[in-house]
Image (cartoon, grey):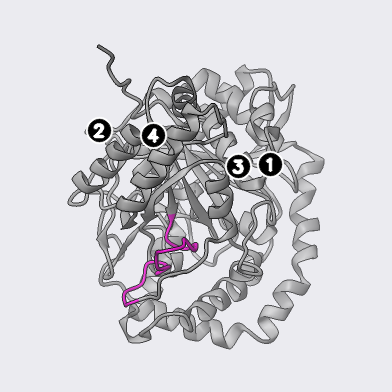
């Protein structure tokens, strides 16, 4: 008598290998994922749309292909995607209420997932237009953190992060416009990768939020993230190979000062201690640690027109704008005002910020910063706030991630530990243009010491 191996927290690489070895079937994995989605609706509430019938049919087909000897990177593996990309047969509500039309075609990223053999089990929750670092909204309720159900998993890829952290799926796709992959990865103890702008195709969109947003990946380990990254970037095994290659001795700039926002930001002592501890671990691995801050200047003036202008674009896609949160409507109106000269100026000054911030890489190979200034926010942390109060809460909690969205350069969140209250926090490894291989290599070296993938939520 054979028993199905418990792969709930085994990760993407191990799950794909178990399928290829015949140790488990895709039907077994997909059935378990669908059962977990249903069982956790009242707790995690990670999914907006579930593909019960379609996913089971695809799993049966994947098992037959495996029996026939076919091998693909993710053949038969259940994967989740964020509800901001198009999936044939499902609406793309992007966190909003209302009756959205069913899409008739997959976006390019979903096409690549399916071409790799993955079985998309559903679309995960995100706040309206992905604008907040929490995942809550009138359209779907509250998505919760599997580490502490009274706290948020972050946002805006909070549904994807919660699903991976709880072991519902081995990896998931998110998107990052101001830290929206890295922040939930930090707050759920995951590896979260924001790629270089243009690395992942935005098709059928020309660009996402005027170029500040890109899709990204969430996984339990660096190797898992590299596998999904290679599938979505269509780069063979390039980043998996990088994750298996030592980075050599690097100079790493430890930076605890965020970019100027006009508001005072206090770094939580436990977050600071966790990031400084990782710097010491990196020094113990032979890297040189220097204290240095990127010269961000007034980079926020470049971010706001592009971000709010993107919100304004999405307002025209909802079936009933009156159903949107008042703060969303206000931000969209502001975006409409900034779409002209301010947006043109943002595009025109991007090279200036590349040169200004890029000077840090004359002194260092990689920048290490906190991913957030605070541990995960409690559920309801922005309920009832005005737009200005919401912005202040966001800035004070998450001031570190968004500048790299302006620049379009890659960044990786790595788990930095847990607070005294058992809440995860993270640190960013940030690089210049086209530095994903270096970041994967460094993160993998750090992971060999930290072994963060061995820790799972206490209630999981």
Number of numbered labels in the structure image: 4
Q: Is 310 left or right of 419, judged from the image as shown?
A: right
Which secondary structure lies at badge 4? helix
Question: Does the residue at mark 2 contact the one at mark 4 (Cβ under 8 Å)?
Answer: no
Instruction: Note whether residue 375 is visible.
Output: no
Q: Which residue is mark 4?
A: 26
In the rendered view, tell whether residue 108 sits above or below residue 276.
Answer: below
**Mark on residue 231?**
3
**What label sits on residue 460 in the rendered view?**
2
Q: How far across and how far down the image is residue 132, in percent?
A: 41, 63
Foreground mark, 1 or 4, reads 4
Q: Residue at x 29, y 39 (%)?
A: 31
Q: Nearer the viewer, mark 1 or mark 3?
A: 3
Between disc 2 and disc 4, whose residue precedes? 4
User: Alpha carbon of mark 1 to alpha carbon of mark 4: how far?
Assistant: 48 Å
Dot 1 surroundings within 10 Å: few (below 14), some, or many (20 or more)? some
- Residue stretch rendered in magenta on the structure: 82-99
What is the x, y in percent for residue 89? 41, 64
Element type at mark 3: helix
The reply to whether callout 1 and callout 3 are in contact (CB within 8 Å) is no
Query: Secondary structure beneath disc 2?
Result: loop
* Snapshot quadrant of residue 419: top left
In magenta stretch: residue 74: no
| Disc 4 versus disc 3: nearer the observer | 4
User: Residue 257's spot in the image, x, y percent?
Assistant: 58, 49
Q: Image quadrant of residue 30? A: top left
Residue shown at 31% from the left, 65% from the top:
382
Residue at (23% x, 42% y) in the render: 35
């Amino acid at each position: 008598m054979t028993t199905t191996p418990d792969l709930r927290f085994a990760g993407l690489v191990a799950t794909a290998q178990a399928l290829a070895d015949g140790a488990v079937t895709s039907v077994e994995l997909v059935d378990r994922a669908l059962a977990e989605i249903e069982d956790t609706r009242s707790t995690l509430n990670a999914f907006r749309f579930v593909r019960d019938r379609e996913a089971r049919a695809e799993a049966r087909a994947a098992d037959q292909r495996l029996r026939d000897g076919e091998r693909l990177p993710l053949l038969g593996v259940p994967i989740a995607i964020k509800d901001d990309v198009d999936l044939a047969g499902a609406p793309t509500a992007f966190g909003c209420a209302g009756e959205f039309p069913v899409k008739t075609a997959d976006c390019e990223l979903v096409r690549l997932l399916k071409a790799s053999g993955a079985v998309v089990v559903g679309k995960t929750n995100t706040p309206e237009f992905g604008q907040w670092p929490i995942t809550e909204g009138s359209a779907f309720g509250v998505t919760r953190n599997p580490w502490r159900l009274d706290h948020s998993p972050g946002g805006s890829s909070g549904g994807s992060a919660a699903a991976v952290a709880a072991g519902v799926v081995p990896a998931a796709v998110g998107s990052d416009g101001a830290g929206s992959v890295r922040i939930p990865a930090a707050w759920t103890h995951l590896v979260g990768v924001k790629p270089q702008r243009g690395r992942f195709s935005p098709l059928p969109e020309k660009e996402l939020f005027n170029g500040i947003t890109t899709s990204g990946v969430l996984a339990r380990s660096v190797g898992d993230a590299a596998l999904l990254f290679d599938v979505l970037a269509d780069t063979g095994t390039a980043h998996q190979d990088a994750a298996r290659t030592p980075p050599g001795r690097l100079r790493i700039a430890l930076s605890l000062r965020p970019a100027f926002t006009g508001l005072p930001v206090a770094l939580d002592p436990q977050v600071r201690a966790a990031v400084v501890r990782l710097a010491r671990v990196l020094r113990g691995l032979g890297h040189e640690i220097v204290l240095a801050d990127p010269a961000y200047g007034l980079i926020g003036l470049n971010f706001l027109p592009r971000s709010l202008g993107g919100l304004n674009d999405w307002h025209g896609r909802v079936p009933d704008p009156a159903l949107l949160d008042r703060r969303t409507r206000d931000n969209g109106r502001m975006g409409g005002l900034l779409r002209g000269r301010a947006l043109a100026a943002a595009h025109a000054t991007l090279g200036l910020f590349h040169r200004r911030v890029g000077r840090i890489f004359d002194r260092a190979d990689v920048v290490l910063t906190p991913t957030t200034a605070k541990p995960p926010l409690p559920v309801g942390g922005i309920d009832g706030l005005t737009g200005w109060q919401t912005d202040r809460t966001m800035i004070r909690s998450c001031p570190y991630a968004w500048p790299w969205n302006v620049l379009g350069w890659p960044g990786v969140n790595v788990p930095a530990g847990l607070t005294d209250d058992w809440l995860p926090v993270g640190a960013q490894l940030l690089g210049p243009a086209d530095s994903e291989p270096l970041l994967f290599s460094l993160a993998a070296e750090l992971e060999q010491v930290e072994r963060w993938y061995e820790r799972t939520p206490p209630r999981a």
